Image (cartoon, rainbow, N blue to C red):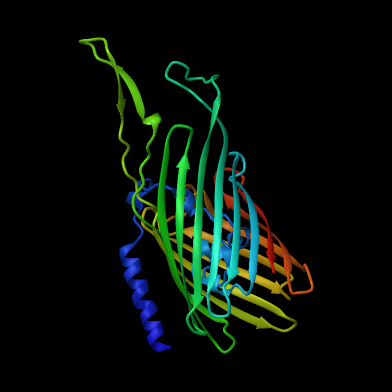
Amino acid sequence: MKKIAISLALFSGVCLTAFAGNPDRSGSAGASELLINPWARSSGLASSSMCSVRGVESAYLNVAGLAFTQGSELLFTNTQYLVGTGIKMNSLGFGQKLGKSGGVLGLSVVNMNFGDIQRTTEALPEGGIGSFQVNYSNIGISYAKGFSQSIYGGLTVRLISESIYNVKAQGVAFDAGIRYVTGEKDNIRFGIALRNVGPTMRYRGDGLTYTVTIPATGNQMTVEQRSQDFELPSMVNVGFAYDFLMKGDMKLTANAQYTSNSFSKDQVALGLEYSFRERFILRGGYQKDIGTNTTYNAKSAITGPTGGFTVQVPAGQNGSMLGLDYSYRASNPFNGTHSMGLHLTF
């Protein structure tokens, strides 16, 4: 156990040194949709549950949690992001255990829709010539496995796409995570995850071209503007979770997480989850940017309290469970973020 603890501490130190928060680089990274939690359960805990989240949702915080999938899992979540902006997210995930010792394979698809946006030109700045849509999406393929009764690890490969009708950017990101479980009843957990690491992305397409006239000849030619490469919003999550086991099949889980961002302020998040017989689960959390005293100088719109709940009922004779998940995240400005999802295990 001492060797494992020392290894985790050294790995954490190296990662935190390499990805220490740098507010001066804020706004210089792209693909910022990768920083938005698309799932209802973990977002209700202010995304602090990297050491307690299980199943397909783990692919967002710490993919090692996927290894705890016992059979098959299917979930869908709809998110009304920053109510008042018209932005919506739809997320679909599937997980499948591959035999007793074959690990777990997971697939997640996230799509972000901004609604119809009016097309404008220099000649028609007020629009009236139709509309277009912005499409942000990513597809993650994950694999996780338990290497012993205490150590679990996983890896995610994520394909990223951002596009409008005449410009697009595509890229790939890698996530990796480790979870260490200990305690008399496996009620103490530590974890570390490296997220959104990959090559730079660049926008390409006909939207970056324009027509110019050569004064000497009057001929016209098409000129292409090259966009600048942008980096992915890499980060490191380090977390801790502790289960308080109570009588009557009740459990209270405390979660804590520190996030080291490469392109913005670092963050801390705390969360509490109360579970009654795994049928009714109540959640609450709080997230804060380090170095900010008020919500007015925060670098993130979603900051502060979060909450949510899950209601589960049996869905068959073979132990299948159907759950309804909900979470709310306070924001400034706008009217918060609501996530509603369905969760099926079988």
**Above/below status of 24 relative to 157:** above
Position of residue 137 measured from the top left corner of the image (x, y, whole percent): 51, 47
Q: Work out whether residue 252 can be spotted.
A: yes
Work out whether residue 73 or residue 197 is closer to the camera in this orientation and state it: 73
User: Residue 85 appears in which quarter of the rendering?
Assistant: top right
User: Residue 193 appears in which quarter of the rendering?
Assistant: bottom left
Work out whether residue 320 or residue 263 is closer to the camera in this orientation and state it: 320
Position of residue 60 measured from the top left corner of the image (x, y, whole percent): 51, 61
Question: Which residue is at 43% across, 48% downward?
Answer: 31
**Above/below status of 95 relative to 161:** below
Work out whether residue 14 or residue 291 is closer to the camera in this orientation and state it: 14
Question: Which residue is at 36% across, 46% downward?
Answer: 201
Q: Quadrant of the image for the N terminus?
A: bottom left
| 85 left or right, relative to 345 | left
Instruction: Farthest residue to the left: give it.
Output: 216
Counting the numbered discs, the total is 0
Position of residue 82 measured from the top left corner of the image (x, y, whole percent): 58, 45
User: Residue 13 appears in which quarter of the rendering?
Assistant: bottom left
**Above/below status of 101 relative to 329:** below
Q: Quadrant of the image for the C terminus?
A: bottom right
Position of residue 312 measured from the top left corner of the image (x, y, whole percent): 74, 67
| 312 left or right, relative to 151 | right
**Above/below status of 221 relative to 334:** above
Q: Work out whether residue 237 can be spotted.
A: no
